[in-house]
């Protein structure tokens, strides 16, 4: 085979490999689309995106959209935002939408909002078209003890300047609920709230609840007011039940103390009786000792026995008389008077 033919074949193979490599590195379709849209994107820029593992379509297509929408930006800025984890396509859409709506929003602030985790396009749309947030049922008690269940609708608009670092919807809902509880709680009667629910909206709206949030509150409207429980009566009932239990506990304490005192007195009486019995048991011994030692004569002993017998007889007569008087009193009570 002729050496010249072999050289031509090798050259053709090398050219084919180079062309295939260039086509694998350079998306010619995107490059042609950029040139057709009058967007300056070089082949080296596209190759650099490939080498940095950045999909060229995610940069070139938003760049074409931005140039056609009148947004001044570069491939480097869009590529840096993509590498930082941002959504380039929604970023460009938000910039175009803000420009059309007359909202002041530059590329740096939009990129910061997007990287902060907020949907920048939705924020721009909410600035143009306010959003209605419906609060859950808020339970509040007026001064007369009647519970009111209030539901409100809050119309908010996104505040572009406070989107980075501003509180979200949950803070708005919490603050509105707190304002409703405070307003209803300061009302003398639940009827005032039912008659003029707009006063609740007006009072809550004047509290500047949107301070430090990513939203601007446009209006607060009371959607529904329902009457709940009579908290005042329930509290009084619970207090009365508690007082009753306290009184019962104190009465039981007094009863137990009384029983303890009674048991103590019985024990003392038993002890005294034991001592008396013990002393009575010693009397005959003492008498015998007195007779034996001559400290007491026989006649003294007999006189003592007569005195004791006389005392016993008198006690017996006194008991019989007392019993008869009680019976006569019972008969007199039972006998009807004429």
Image (cartoon, rainbow, N blue to C red):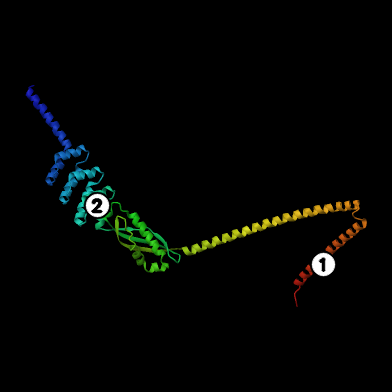
When the figure is inspected, residue 11 is found, relative to residue 71, above or below; the finding is above
Element on which disc 2 rests: helix
* Position of residue 182 measured from the top left corner of the image (x, y, whole percent): 39, 62
Label drawn at residue 121: 2
Between residues 5 and 183, which one lies in front from this camera angle?
A: 183
- 202 sits left or right of 227 in the view: left
- 325 sits left or right of 303 in the view: left
Tell me the residue at 18%/38% (across/down). Answer: 48
Tell me the residue at 22%/43% (across/down). Answer: 80
Q: Specify which label sits upstream in the sequence, 2 or 1.
A: 2
Residue density around tag 1, few if under 14, some if 14–19, many if 20 or more, within 10 Å: few
- 327 sits left or right of 5 in the view: right
- 280 sits left or right of 150 in the view: right
Tell me the residue at 22%/47% (across/down). Answer: 89
Label drawn at residue 321: 1
Residue density around tag 2, few if under 14, some if 14–19, many if 20 or more, within 10 Å: many
Between residues 331 and 250, which one lies in front from this camera angle?
A: 250
Element on which disc 1 rests: helix
In which quadrant of the rendered view does residue 190 lie? bottom left
* Position of residue 330 measured from the top left corner of the image (x, y, whole percent): 76, 69
Residue mark closest to the camera, 2 vs 1: 1
Gap between marks 2 and 1, in whole Å?
A: 113 Å
Label drawn at residue 256: none
Between residues 211 and 223, which one lies in front from this camera angle?
A: 211
Between residues 304 and 60, which one lies in front from this camera angle?
A: 304
When the figure is inspected, residue 13 is found, relative to residue 195, above or below; the finding is above
Tell me the residue at 57%/61% (across/down). Answer: 244
In which quadrant of the rendered view does residue 124 lie? bottom left
């Amino acid at each position: 085979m002729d050496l010249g033919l072999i050289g031509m074949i090798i050259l053709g193979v090398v050219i084919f490999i180079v062309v295939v490599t260039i086509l694998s590195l350079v998306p010619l379709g995107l490059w042609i689309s950029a040139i057709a849209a009058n967007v300056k994107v070089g082949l080296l820029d596209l190759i650099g995106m490939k080498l940095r593992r950045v999909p060229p379509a995610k940069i070139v297509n938003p760049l074409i959209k931005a140039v056609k929408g009148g947004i001044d930006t570069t491939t480097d800025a869009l590529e840096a935002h993509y590498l930082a984890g941002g959504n380039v396509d929604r970023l460009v859409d938000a910039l175009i939408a803000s420009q059309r709506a007359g909202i002041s929003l530059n590329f740096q602030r939009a990129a910061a909002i997007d990287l902060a985790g907020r949907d920048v396009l939705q924020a721009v749309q909410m600035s143009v078209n306010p959003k209605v947030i419906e609060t859950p049922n808020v339970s509040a008690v007026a001064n007369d003890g009647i519970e009111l269940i209030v539901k409100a609708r809050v119309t908010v608009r996104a505040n572009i300047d406070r989107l980075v670092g501003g509180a979200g919807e949950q803070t708005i809902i919490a603050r509105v609920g707190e304002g409703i509880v405070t307003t209803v709680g300061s009302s003398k009667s639940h009827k005032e709230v039912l008659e003029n629910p707009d006063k609740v909206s007006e009072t809550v709206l004047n509290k500047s609840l949107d301070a430090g949030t990513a939203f601007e509150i446009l209006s607060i409207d009371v959607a529904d007011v329902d009457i709940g429980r009579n908290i005042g009566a329930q509290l009084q009932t619970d207090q009365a039940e508690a007082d009753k239990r306290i009184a019962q506990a104190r009465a039981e304490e007094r009863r137990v103390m009384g029983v303890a005192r009674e048991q103590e007195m019985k024990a003392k009486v038993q002890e005294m009786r034991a001592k008396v019995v013990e002393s009575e048991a010693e009397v005959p011994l003492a008498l015998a000792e007195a007779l034996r030692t001559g400290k007491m004569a026989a006649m003294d002993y007999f006189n003592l026995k007569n005195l004791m017998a006389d005392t016993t007889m008198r006690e017996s007569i006194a008991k019989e008389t007392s019993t008869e008087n009680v019976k006569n009193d019972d008969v007199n009570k039972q006998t009807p008077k004429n």
